């Protein structure tokens, strides 16, 4: 029998947590042959609700669920973790400035980075979902000097999936016929969903769409502002689709991406495509052997360059702000 993999989920009692945990326990994160032990990390006020979720997980009698533990202390919660999904974060409150938000999250992701550094397993892989995800990942990474930097990633797979779905709806293609879309930059409204290398049924997407106005005025803003549109419609931020994207991200990281296509993930830049080294920025990526790799050699046209640069500039500002606050 394969040894169970320890998966720590922070914010386990929140709405994404509720959509995520059952799918992890059913084998959708790591595959149908890998048992999992869930480690739910919450703040003390969230522990009772996490206990309720754990009762429901028990009641599903999942074959692959080898145990559930609940913690309100990060050091204990990350002990032995192989996969860490950092979902819990401080939402922006009334009157809170961007700097206040970054500082409040520094108070969460700094200690969590330290706790990961102290006790996580050697093969730890971290996905940050809690916003501002890219910069929270940077804070956690900076506080975990003994963990290889590339093990810290942030989620732009939801943006990628949103872009796939919008492009499929516009062209009448099946989602499965679309390849090689890219989300560049920050998981924020400055992100750039790029179809210039995408193919639909083997044809260049730009040729199939052939509608620059739709690209500029509909597709890009719809994808980039979809999170806000969901909040407006639901009265709460996306949860099941965010959980789904987290499953996709970790599944592909661990099991590899299909041959001949790439996906999008925010990973530490190695300087590719002019993105300053060390920024955790979204790129076109493939995964093999359990490691992400940035797809190299793509031509970046002027239209794309300006948009990538704008999102990267925002990431640079966020990095400078958390540096200024002493968080990294
Ligand atoms: P939620 O408010 O329903 O749940 C958050 C949970 O985190 C709460 O149960 C809270 O008690 C817990 N928490 C807070 N601080 C914690 C800490 N220090 N340690 C452990 N747990 C802690 O929120 P949600 O809807 O589940 O969303 C969570 C985060 O994900 C938000 O920051 C949201 O903006 C973000 N998000 C990101 C994406 C993305 O694509 N990257 C998409 C959707 C939502
Ligand atoms: C999303 O993209 O749905 C979320 O990141 C939005 C948010 O601000 O929580």
Image (cartoon, rainbow, N blue to C red):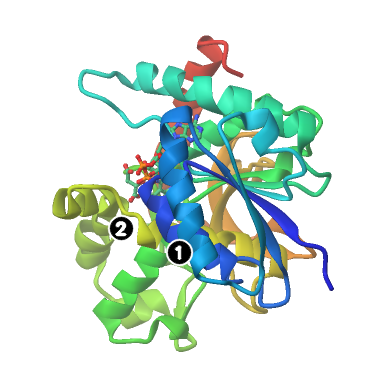
* Mark 1, other Cα within 10 Å: few <14 / some 14–19 / many ≥20: some
**The disc label shown at residue 244, or none:** 1
Alpha carbon separation for disc pair 1 and 2: 17 Å
* Mark 2, other Cα within 10 Å: few <14 / some 14–19 / many ≥20: many
Q: Secondary structure at mark 2?
A: helix
Nearer to us in this view, 246 or 28: 28
Nearer to us in this view, 313 or 92: 92
**Quadrant housing the N terminus:** bottom right
Residue 83 lies, in percent from the top left, at: 68, 51
**The disc label shown at residue 223, or none:** 2
Check if mark 1's residue and mark 2's residue have beta carbons within 8 Å. Answer: no
The quarter of the displayed image where residue 74 is located? top right
Residue drawn 72% across the image and 45% down it: 81
Mark toward the start of the polypeptide (1 vs 2):
2
Residue 191 lies, in percent from the top left, at: 39, 47
Q: Is residue 66 visible?
A: yes
Residue drawn 22% across the image and 48% down it: 231
């Amino acid at each position: 029998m394969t040894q169970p993999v320890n998966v720590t989920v922070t914010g386990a009692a929140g709405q994404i947590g509720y959509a995520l945990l059952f799918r992890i326990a059913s084998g959708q994160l790591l595959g149908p042959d890998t048992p999992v032990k869930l480690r739910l990390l919450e703040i003390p006020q969230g522990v009772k609700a996490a206990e309720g979720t754990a009762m429901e997980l028990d009641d599903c009698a999942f074959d692959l669920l080898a145990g559930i533990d609940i913690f309100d202390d990060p050091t204990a919660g990350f002990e032995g973790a192989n996969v860490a999904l950092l979902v819990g974060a401080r939402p922006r409150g009334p009157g809170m400035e961007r700097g206040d938000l970054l500082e409040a999250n520094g108070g969460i992701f700094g200690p969590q980075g330290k706790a990961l550094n102290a006790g996580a397993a050697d093969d730890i892989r971290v996905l940050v979902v809690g916003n501002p995800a890219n910069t929270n990942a940077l804070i956690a990474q900076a506080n975990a000097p003994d963990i290889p930097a590339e093990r810290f990633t942030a989620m732009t797979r939801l943006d990628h999936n949103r872009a796939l779905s919008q492009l499929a709806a516009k062209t009448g293609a099946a989602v499965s016929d679309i390849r090689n879309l890219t989300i560049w930059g920050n998981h924020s409204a400055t992100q750039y969903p790029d179809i210039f290398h995408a193919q639909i049924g083997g044809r260049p997407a730009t040729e199939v769409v052939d509608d620059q106005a739709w690209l500029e005025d509909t597709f890009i803003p719809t994808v980039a502002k979809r999170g806000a549109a969901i909040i407006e419609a639901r009265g709460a931020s996306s949860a099941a689709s965010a959980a789904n994207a987290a499953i996709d991200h970790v599944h592909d990281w661990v099991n590899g991406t299909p041959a001949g296509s790439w996906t999008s993930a925010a990973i530490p830049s190695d300087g590719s495509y002019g993105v300053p080294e060390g920024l955790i920025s979204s790129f076109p990526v493939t995964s093999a052997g359990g490691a992400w790799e940035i797809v190299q050699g793509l031509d970046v046209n002027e239209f794309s360059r300006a948009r990538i640069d704008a999102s990267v500039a925002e990431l640079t500002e966020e990095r400078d702000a958390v540096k200024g606050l002493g968080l990294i």
